[in-house]
Amino acid sequence: MSIDDLDKIYLRTPSKRTGSLDTVAKFKETVGPSEITRLDRMYSAYFYSDPTTLLVMQSS
């Protein structure tokens, strides 16, 4: 997966609307530890957010 693939990930809101991850996050490639995190033998990633930020998704 590359950084360009991250905009293909979609999130579902509690109201059942969907939006792409790049509408709520900014991506930046950096140097980090050479470790692959897995959960049940599948790749996994950790996401951190600021819970005080209000997100409003408009329907298209």
Image (spheres, rainbow, N blue to C red):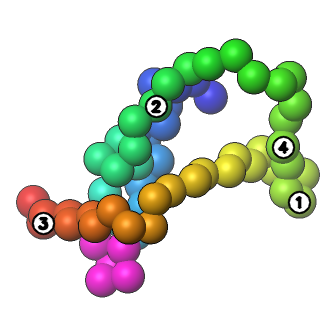
Three-letter amino acid code of the residue under disc 2? Phe
Tell me where residue 36 sits by quadrant.
top right
The 10 Å Cα crowd at callout 3, few under 14, some 14 to 19, many 20 or more, is few
Marks 3 and 4 sit apart, C-alpha to C-alpha, by 34 Å
Foreground mark, 1 or 2, reads 2
Residue designated by label 3: 59
Three-letter amino acid code of the residue under disc 4? Thr
Residue designated by label 1: 40
Residue designated by label 2: 27
Foreground mark, 4 or 2, reads 2
Residue name at image x 84 percent, y 43 percent: 37
Q: Earlier in the sequence, mark 2 or mark 3?
A: 2
x%, y% of residue 45? 69, 47
Looking at the picture, does residue 33 appear above or below residue 12? Answer: above
Q: Earlier in the sequence, mark 4 or mark 2?
A: 2
Looking at the picture, does residue 58 appear above or below residue 41? Answer: below
Asked if labels 1 and 3 touch by Cβ distance under 8 angstroms, the answer is no
Is 43 placed left or right of 27 in the picture? right
Residue range corresponding to the magenta coloring: 13-17
Q: Earlier in the sequence, mark 3 or mark 4?
A: 4
| Picture disc at residue 37 | 4
The 10 Å Cα crowd at callout 4, few under 14, some 14 to 19, many 20 or more, is few
Outermost residue, front direction?
A: 52
Looking at the picture, does residue 53 appear above or below residue 33? Answer: below
Three-letter amino acid code of the residue under disc 1? Asp
| Picture disc at residue 31 | none
x%, y% of residue 33? 83, 25
Residue name at image x 58 percent, y 53 percent: 48
Is 44 placed left or right of 52 in the picture? right
